[in-house]
Image: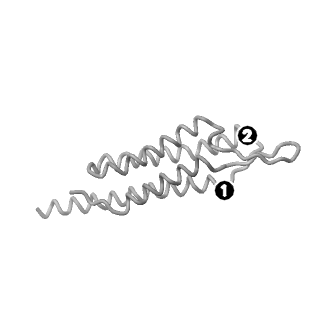
Amino acid sequence: MQIQRIQTLLLLIAVALMCVFCLTPYAQTTAADGTVTDVFVKDTPVLLIVNACIAVLLFLNIFLYKDLKRQMSLTIVSALLLAGSAVACGFVVTVGLPDARLIWTGGVLLLVVTLILALCAYRCMRSDKRKLSSYDRLR
């Protein structure tokens, strides 16, 4: 028996936010003539592939409720990939596009909220694991 509660909802919201992040600009560049251009994740194919893989991992993670250890480890891997994606987005903006600036209320906030949701889901899974082990001690 596995206890599956709030972490499913948290992971589903994280998947939705990752999909929205792939469609939302995370930076803006200003050209010499003053025109502002948005920088999307699709402009950097490597970031698009990594973020799509993160979304797929988070989505598959929802269906691993029967194997709590695997679900927890996949959540940690997804969180690490999310942190790496955030660093890579910052790296692309600072090194690849030196005149660009991050849009904090757009894509960057989505990445941070997704990371927080994944870590909260992991915390709920850890709580369920402790609860199940205490039930096993009672048997």
Q: Residues within 10 Å of mark 2 (few under 14, many from 20)?
A: some
96 left or right of 121? right
138 left or right of 28? left
Q: Which mark is residue 86?
A: none
Amino acid type at circle 1 is Trp
Marks 2 and 1, how far apart at CA: 16 Å
Going 80% across and 46% down the picture, which residue do you hit? 30
Q: Nearer the viewer, residue 50 or 86?
A: 50
Could you tell me which quadrant the C terminus lies in? bottom left
Could you tell me which quadrant the N terminus lies in? bottom left
Going 38% across and 55% down the picture, which residue do you hit? 122
**Rendered location of residue 94, percent (x, y):** 70, 43
Classify mark 1: helix, strand or loop.
helix
The residue at which mark 2 appears reads as: 97
Going 51% across and 47% down the picture, which residue do you hit? 82
Going 44% across and 46% down the picture, which residue do you hit? 78
In the picture, residue 125 is in which quadrant?
Answer: bottom left
**Rendered location of residue 79, percent (x, y):** 46, 49
Please identify the residue farthest to the left as the structure is shown. 139
Q: Which mark is residue 104?
A: 1
